[in-house]
Image: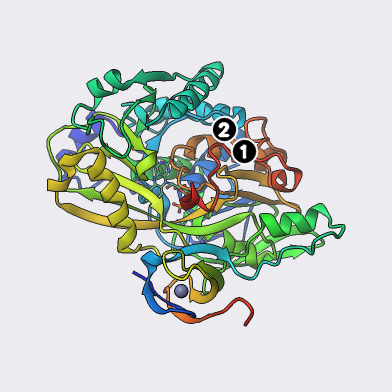
Amino acid sequence: MLNIKCPYCGDRSQKEFAYGGDGTIARPKLNQEISDEEWDNFVYLRKSPRGKHIELWHHIAGCRQWFKVERDTTTHEIFRTFKPEE
Amino acid sequence: MQKYSVFSLIKNAFSNHEKWDLAWKDPTPKKEYDVVIIGGGGHGLATAYYLAKEHQITNVAVIEKGWIGGGNIGRNTTIIRSNFMYDDNARFNEFGMNLWRNMSQELNFNVMFSPRGIINLAHSDAQMNAYARRGNSMRLNGIDAVLLNREEVKKIIPMADFSEDVRYPIFGGLAQPSAGTARHDAVAWGYARQADSMGVDIIQNCEVTGFDIEAGKITGLRTSRGDIKSKKIGLCVAGSTNVLAEKLNMTLPIETHLLQACVSEPVKPVLDGVVTFGAGHFYISQSDKGEMVMGGDLDGYNSYAQKGNLPTIQHVLTGGVALFPFLSRLKMLRTWGGIMDMSMDGSPIIDKTHIDGLYLNCGWCYGGFKSVPSSGWTFAHTIAQDRVHELNEGFSLNRFSKGYLLDEKGLGTKTWIS
Ligand SMILES: Cc1cc2nc3c(=O)[nH]c(=O)nc-3n(C[C@H](O)[C@H](O)[C@H](O)COP(=O)(O)OP(=O)(O)OC[C@H]3O[C@@H](n4cnc5c(N)ncnc54)[C@H](O)[C@@H]3O)c2cc1C
Ligand SMILES: [Zn+2]
């Protein structure tokens, strides 16, 4: 079981969280012309690396804040957790 | 190649079964092949077999970093079905059903294909309507579909909880009587043995570490056992697709996730077919040995660990006990996991790529065992003819950017949302 440190609440069990996927994907800017390719990149394409991965988690059964986690996708070691704007 | 039969069995009994031929050789990699298939799972081995058998291309190597049967081909829960609504999925998998029916004879290897049927349970009128629609689509594609009411389901699985005050009362279900199960590693061994007998080199303990690309064309690959030249390379690495894509500078509509399964101690026959309880994130069948084979959802976050976390198993079994209360009294024997190439719409990709001579086979999610024959057959065609077959036309790599998704059940990589 993962033990995740919510930057707002501290250490909690994995069961309190929902996963939000790759945390490095940036949504294309609003109200600007974008190509199909850019949209495709944003919606569908993922690197899904083996090793370090920066990802979004949601403390859904807690403070309900979104935050980021840097985790190893093979060992599940969590290196750090931080607020989205950090 | 020695033919397996009751006579060869008797004959070998006299020599204490010590003189059987090796099922396949253990060759050293050659410098060059006409086609190299990366990944010795079900899909890679079937592809090599159909390249040799259907296209007479026999100067082929299957490069496997571990051992034959060590990947998902030896880790799945062996459900074989074609109960799909969309034409592309339905036709492709029903084509596969026909290959399954003859597989033991064709491969001279008993894969124990057992068409014992599958039932997807429904828990509301709306779900019954959706199943009626799916069943009708299946029938239009010549696939057997039977809509069962509550009483009919009860006849087949009387030990399920049919009370009315449960969270998900059973309203009925959609059955595909011709669906079933098979022995997974026999499938890998059967394809490997026949491919080998036609001249394919099956190279184990050999990891692909890089690619050679010149002017947009693939020319060869690097492996832990030396460089190999080839103008045609097929990628069949399932859960390692993203890792090799990175070496090719490609980003794919695939995320890598972990799926677990577990089996109980063996008990007397109690469950005939496969039952899926989607609302409870649970499915079950009983193996020929008597073990209850059970699984459910992904662990829920990107993972390359071939073992899972306990909360998921607990979640799966909670759903299991809700449906079949008798399960609470069984001991669990084993749990295990496999890493899945989850595509963004839940359907596979079998296509050419922007690199000449590089072919892609991936996105099997947790349903790639049933597709081993149809995928091998169509991928061999795609590689041999350098163009897709009409059966895998819909499984294109660019369907995401074009908007032609095959989102059969609205699954994709975030299955835990639904
Ligand atoms: C728990 C579980 C239950 C499942 N249940 C079902 C089911 O009931 N029905 C169903 O249809 N499907 C099911 N599946 C899915 C199915 O098992 C897979 O979709 C399918 O086996 C994937 O194709 P494969 O057999 O070719 O993969 P694999 O057997 O995983 O083959 C890929 C191979 O590539 C090799 N490889 C990776 N990287 C390299 C490299 N760099 N160099 C050389 N070789 C490499 C790997 O070692 C591996 O052997 C299940 C999967 C799991 C894990
Ligand atoms: Zn919190």
The residue sitting at 40% across, 19% down in the picture is: B147
Instruction: Please tell me which of labels 2 and 1 falls first in the chain.
Output: 2
Callout 2: helix, strand or loop? helix
Give amino acid for label 1: Leu
Q: Quadrant of the N terminus of chain B?
A: top left
The residue sitting at 34% across, 49% down in the picture is: B22
Does residue A52 lie above or below B237 as drawn? below
Q: Residues within 10 Å of mark 2 (few under 14, many from 20)?
A: many
Give amino acid for label 2: Asn
Name the foreground residue: B366 vs B75.
B366
| Separation of residues labelled 2 and 1 (CA atoms) | 8 Å
Does residue B402 lie above or below B119 as drawn? below
Q: Position of residue B66 (x, y in %)?
A: 42, 62
Instruction: Spot the residue most to the right.
Output: A33
Does residue B358 lie above or below B56 as drawn? below
Can residue A42 be seen from the camera position used here?
yes
Q: Determine the chain carrying the residue at label 2.
A: B
CB of residue at label 1: within 8 Å of ligand 1?
Answer: no
Q: Is residue A45 left or right of residue B73?
A: right
On the image, numbered disc 1 is attached to which residue? B406
Name the foreground residue: B366 vs B359.
B366
Q: Is residue B276 left or right of residue B215?
A: left
Q: Determine the chain carrying the residue at label 1.
A: B
Does residue B263 lie above or below B119 as drawn? below
Q: Position of residue B42 (x, y in %)?
A: 46, 45
Can residue B302 be seen from the camera position used here?
no
On the image, numbered disc 2 is attached to which residue? B89
Using the rendered view, name the quadrant where residue B78 is placed: top left
Q: Position of residue B378 (x, y in %)?
A: 60, 36
The residue sitting at 58% across, 44% down in the picture is: B348
